[in-house]
Image (cartoon, rainbow, N blue to C red):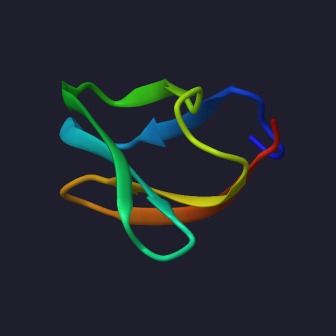
Amino acid sequence: PNPFNPSTRINYTLRNQTEVTLSVFDAMGRMVASINKGVQEPGSHFINFNGTKLSSGVYYYKLQTAFFTDTKKMLLIK
């Protein structure tokens, strides 16, 4: 999803049925968004993230389930 303006699609694959939450943090570690997708079935999924209300800069997203946590950097350029 790098760079993105103003939205991006975050793809992920689940091996088990689990609850999915996406949190977005700014470079200072402050949470700027949280999206709870609820319980999802195994397979390929995606979350559309809209950064319209955010300023340009580096952000980190954390995709969290009961089985794993994945954190990646993304760059918003307006």
Residue 15 found in image quarter: top left
Q: How many marks?
A: 0
Residue 6 found in image quarter: top right
Relative vertical location of residue 77 with respect to residue 43 in this rendering, above or below: below
Please state, as top left, top right, bottom left or bottom right, where the N terminus lies in the image.
top right
Q: Nearer the viewer, residue 53 or 45?
A: 53
What residue is shown at x 49% (from left), y 38% (from top)? 13
User: Would residue 8 appear left or right of 3 to someone viewing this image?
Assistant: left
Please state, as top left, top right, bottom left or bottom right, where the C terminus lies in the image.
top right
Q: Nearer the viewer, residue 8 or 65?
A: 8
User: Would residue 53 appear left or right of 43 to someone viewing this image?
Assistant: right
Relative vertical location of residue 1 with respect to residue 45 in this rendering, above or below: below
**Which x, y percent locates residue 76?**
73, 45
Q: Nearer the viewer, residue 22 or 25?
A: 25
What residue is shown at x 24% (from left), y 26% (from top)? 40
Q: Nearer the viewer, residue 62 or 42?
A: 62
What residue is shown at x 83% (from left), y 44% (from top)? 3
Residue 4 found in image quarter: top right
**Which x, y percent locates residue 64?**
31, 55
**Which x, y percent locates residue 61?**
50, 55
What residue is shown at x 57% (from left), y 71% (from top)? 27
**Which x, y percent locates residue 19?**
17, 39
Relative vertical location of residue 9 with respect to residue 54 in this rendering, above or below: above
Relative vertical location of residue 3 with respect to residue 44 in this rendering, above or below: below
